[in-house]
Amino acid sequence: MSVEVRVPRADEAEAVARCQLDCWRDAYAGLVDPARLGPSLDDVAANVERWHAILAGPARVRVAVEDGRLVGFATVRPGADGAPDHLAALYTRRAHWSTGLGQRLLDAVLGGAPATLRVFRDNERAVRFYARNGFVPDGYEGEEPHWGGVEIGMVRTGRSAHPR
């Protein structure tokens, strides 16, 4: 099966929203208190509305599609006033972890450009992935306000020559 990485269509907001919720379930199991994560997972309508706005806005979004089903996505928000862009989201479904799809999404949405991001400190898998792609801790550490858990900031200042 081949996975296509492409720009999403405006009519795919619901599919992206549902993919995001599924990815959150997988990615944050054991990292986020289920009592705090649960309400976000149950509010599909609000997430769909949010994705309509994201797809209509200035963010760069790429989706990964396999057999007509979204299996991952990445979103980059433009930096303000000359600041680097911000990698706001990069997720794949669990079945696509360690397949190279996350790398393909990152390359498609950001390339090797400078950027910032935030990631849960205890999400060692994600921290390693970003480090392989030239991101280093930027000194920020704080509680994620919605779900709890400690986030760290990471930054990539130059073009990345990530390993293939």
Image (tube, rainbow, N blue to C red):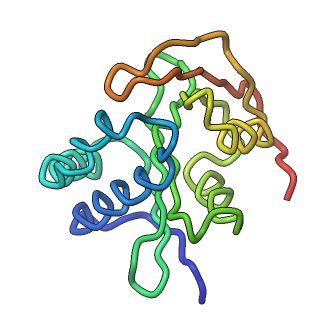
Comparing 15 with 157, the one in front is 15
Residue 56 percent across, percent down from the top left: 24, 49
Residue 97 image position (x, y, % from top left): 63, 63
Instruction: Please indicate whether residue 62 sits to the left or right of residue 114 in the image.
Output: left
Residue at (21% x, 49% y) in the render:
47
Q: On the rendered structure, is 157 left or right of 55?
A: right
Q: Position of residue 105 (x, y in %)?
A: 58, 58
**As rendered, which of 42 and 85 lies closer to the eye?**
42
Q: Is residue 5 above or below residue 149?
A: below
Quarter location, residue 141: top right
Tell me which corner region of the image, top left, top right, bottom left or bottom right, holds residue 37: top left
Q: Where is the C terminus found, in terms of image quarters?
A: bottom right
In this rendering, the count of numbered labels is 0
Image x and y of residue 91, in percent: 51, 53
67 and 114: which is toward the camera: 67
Q: In this view, does 41 lie above or below 149?
A: below
> At 51% from the left edge and 31% from the top edge, which residue is drawn?
86
Relative to the observer, which residue lies in front, 123 or 61?
Answer: 123
The quarter of the rendered structure image containing the N terminus is: bottom right
Identify which residue is drawn at 62% across, 51% down. Answer: 106
Which residue: 43% across, 64% down? 7
